[in-house]
Image: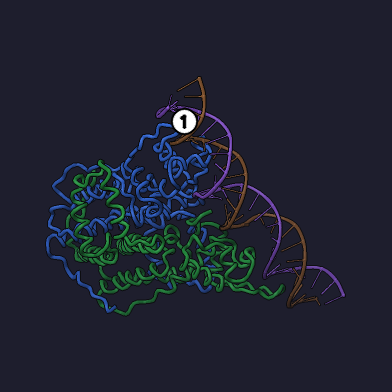
Chain colours: A green, B blue, C brown, D purple
Amino acid sequence: MTDADHTGTGDPRRTIELLWGVREKPRRGPKPKLTVEEIVTASIELADTEGISALSVRRGAERLGVSPMTIYTYIPGRAELLDLMIDRVHGELTDPPESHDWRVTMTILAEDAWEMYHRHPWMLQLTTGRLPLGPHTFAKHERELRAVDAIGLTDLEMDAVVAMVNGFVQGIARGSVESASLVRRSGLTDMEWWTASAPVLAEIPEADAGLFPLAARIGQAAGETHGAASAPLHTFRFGLARILDGVEQLVNGDSGSSGVELPS
Amino acid sequence: MTDADHTGTGDPRRTIELLWGVREKPRRGPKPKLTVEEIVTASIELADTEGISALSVRRGAERLGVSPMTIYTYIPGRAELLDLMIDRVHGELTDPPESHDWRVTMTILAEDAWEMYHRHPWMLQLTTGRLPLGPHTFAKHERELRAVDAIGLTDLEMDAVVAMVNGFVQGIARGSVESASLVRRSGLTDMEWWTASAPVLAEIPEADAGLFPLAARIGQAAGETHGAASAPLHTFRFGLARILDGVEQLVNGDSGSSGVELPS
DNA sequence: ACACAACTCTGTACACCGTAGAGAGAACGT
DNA sequence: ACGTTCTCTCTACGGTGTACAGAGTTGTGT
């Protein structure tokens, strides 16, 4: 039981009730010490500061001052807890200001998501696959569709554009977040790690730099400009602009040689 | 110790020597039962069939018919093993046929990577952050840069285009792979899962479908067309074509309103 | 021929994980 | 007052990566 098994496991009814905050009024027993909200809050804090792998039921319970098994009084299991965390964090995202320019709206949404993933890196490990059917997750999707509504795309194109931008943001954010986390964990910046590794590589006769001339040239250029082996924020903004350029072509109906067909 | 802590841990010299297959000729002791290659092969098979979380040192050793600690004779630890697995799999990728059209080359490379991620889903959990400094990983990077060499981009633009496409492919592939894996694990297709969940949602008064009109409409349209809640392959090909359109504009120097500036 | 160094392999141990199951204690309806 | 229902806790199981100590095997130097 590691990460990655969250939504799609467990009783859907119970999960959905938890996501939408439906209480079925228990009256009899002793007063609960905790609420589901407190558990979710504590779990998010733990995941933010120490990573998703440090978020164990035991650690969460310890932080809340109860024994591990107490958590299971409130939540069926770890999978449901992760769903609740995801939906809670999606609630941090808000509607962008009105704009007549869909590119501006899309850019703001993408930048908001980018920042959200950096506040909560563990989201990138959980938001693949089926998303929880919670209110804030629905709202996020609706908001994204609204940004490309009535700009001249078909329903299917709207769907594809939103999915494509989300996939892109997640793909690049993952690299960014992982790189930052490695710096924290290893105490070495990308640059320091590279300058520590390069001499070792140079000792290996098979690893002749002449074999990879472009990688050497471009790596050098990128390193000098960005002061790092990779510049995720730059890649993110550059790539997003390219993607929106491509979407704009589609909207304008002059999408170029988009029909590259493969032999397969 | 879960996943995600691979490269950047451990002694770089030993790791690099393993990656490049440098043997320093030990002669004295008993003949080794195993080779590093065998361990990597068995580990990849295990990760392919049962997922990266099932790939434990114990399971790998069991499959090879040795005791768990024997593995540590060949490899310093799990982190190094993961690096070796990554580089090995990168070696499955080959040079595309020569083409005068960089779009064709880029598309082939992206499709190859797409398929590779589907053969080895665990790669998506490991290839964020620092990549191993192995021969096949270098070759992959060089190949990608060659695809956009001398088409009219600056060094920095080449770097950004390659990073952007890689991030995009990984982002979409992750959703695709995770969705397929959920179908296998839960025994429910996305469609079945949704039709099981929808009635439960309908019972929650707060979850009024009228609150999310676009999501409802587009979800319906996508479902009818693709027969599924999401169509990752379609998103991948559609998105890649948009991205390449955007890059082509950049090459042609008529990149549109790429300069969206944010208040931040 | 023989001792020894170098090497492979293994058993045990530790501190973690998610959670099943049983049961103790508290608060309410009757 | 009593029984029901609920919260909370304890113990236990099978899993993880790997540190450490030691047993067994082989090639080398004398």
Examine the image and state in which quarter residue A176 appears. bottom left
Closest to the observer, A88 or B194: A88
* For residue A79, side relative to residue A146 (left or right): right
Chain ID, mark 1: B
Vertical placement of residue A62 versus B130, above or below? below
* For residue C26, side relative to residue B184 (left or right): right
* For residue A167, side relative to residue D7 (left or right): left
* Badge 1: residue crowd in 10 Å (few <14, some 14–19, many ≥20): few
Q: What amino acid is at disc 1? A: Pro
* For residue B155, side relative to residue A139 (left or right): left
Q: Circle 1 is placed at which residue position?
A: B30
Q: Residue at x 29, y 70 (%)?
A: A106
Closest to the observer, A251 or A33: A33
Q: Position of residue B148 (x, y in %)?
A: 18, 53
Q: For residue B227, say whether it is visible.
A: no
Q: For residue A203, say whether it is visible.
A: yes
The count of marks equals 1
Q: Position of residue A254 (x, y in %)?
A: 17, 62
Vertical placement of residue B25 versus B174, above or below? above
Q: Position of residue A242 (x, y in %)?
A: 22, 63
Closest to the observer, B176 or A125: A125
